Amino acid sequence: MSPRSDPLKYPFEEHPAPGEAVEVATDVFWLRMPMPGRLDHINVWLLRDYDGWTIVDTGLNHEDIRELWELVFSRYLDGHPVTRVISTHLHGDHTGLAGWLVRRWGVQLWMSRADFVLCKMMAADGPSDIPEDAIRFYQRAGFSDEKLDEYRRRFGSFGANISPLPTGFKRLSDGDYIDIGGREWRVVIGRGHAPEHVCLYCPELKTLIAGDQVLPRITPNVSVNPSEPDANPLKEWLDSCAHLRSVLPSNILVLPAHERLYYGLHER
């Protein structure tokens, strides 16, 4: 898509360097954590709360990301603690350091139920736990022997990017309201990319923390998996797009998990 035809507006030309935070709305700070792969980063968020800070999304469970968080803590918390950790969904770049952060600060993890449970289940799989029905699932889907061997080699790697999650969590459901620093953040659940993807909308700030549900230039991964072979995640994702458009206004700042912050939710 050329800049001339792009209907979205990008209010921030530069992104924060690792270990730096940029205020993008009142008491909402944008951080970027590096990750391997084509996207090479995840955007995470630090929200000023009454007596501390709320973290939304975490980065992968890597030592260099933990060091960047410690740098952020020393630079930006003004002596106040982290009081809550929110993960938008189960994937490792969003939940990878959730367990470490809640132990580091002695706080609670807030997630949707389906994503918390599935994340715990997937993180428990070891390299030797390859299920035969999953192999048959991918054979029916047309995987070559080479692709099946790659699946076998990679199986069980999900947990390596996830710091052990706590036993319990605070459940987030569609329509919930969270009071963060005197502002209401509404929970809007999306589906398709993850079972119950948490988006957070603040009407006062006209700001949406969108996670991976609505990205500015790419479509999130929408896949059928062996754990639910008869699912229709593409329909769920398209239905979620319609739902977000119906319940959210168009003139809001969208904070996606990857790439640039933008205006133009309805156009997207």
Image (tube, grey):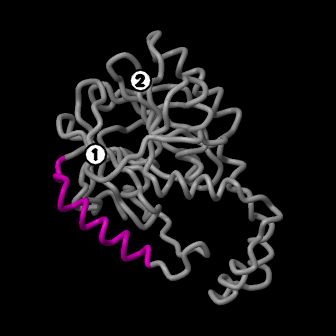
Residue visible at 18% across and 61% down? 246
Residue 159: x percent and y percent? Answer: 69, 51
Residue 235: in magenta span: yes
Residue visible at 52% across and 51% down? 116
Circle 1: element type: loop
Residue 265: x percent and y percent? Answer: 25, 55
- Residue that extends furthest to the right in the rendered view of this protein: 128
Q: Amino acid at mark 1?
A: Asp
Residue visible at 50% across and 27% down? 107
Q: Is residue 170 above or below residue 48?
A: below
Q: Which picture quadrant has residue 95?
A: top right
Q: Nearer the viewer, mark 1 or mark 2?
A: 1
Label 2: few (<14), some or many (≥20) within 10 Å? many
Residue 108: x percent and y percent? Answer: 49, 33
Q: Which picture quadrant has residue 137?
A: bottom right
The quadrant of the rendering that contains the N terminus is bottom left
* Residue corresponding to mark 2: 53
Residue visible at 37% across and 16% down? 51
Most common SS among magenta residues: helix
* Residue corresponding to mark 1: 176
Q: Amino acid at mark 2?
A: Trp
Label 1: few (<14), some or many (≥20) within 10 Å? some
The quadrant of the rendering that contains the C terminus is bottom left
Residue 191: x percent and y percent? Answer: 39, 64
Circle 2: element type: strand
Dot 1 or dot 2, earlier in sequence: 2
- The segment highlighted magenta reads 232-251
Looking at the picture, tell me which residue is in the foreground, 89 or 32: 89
Q: Is residue 108 above or below residue 186?
A: above
Task: Give the distance between the C-alpha atoms of the residues marked 1 and 2, in whole angstroms.
Answer: 19 Å
Residue 201: in magenta span: no
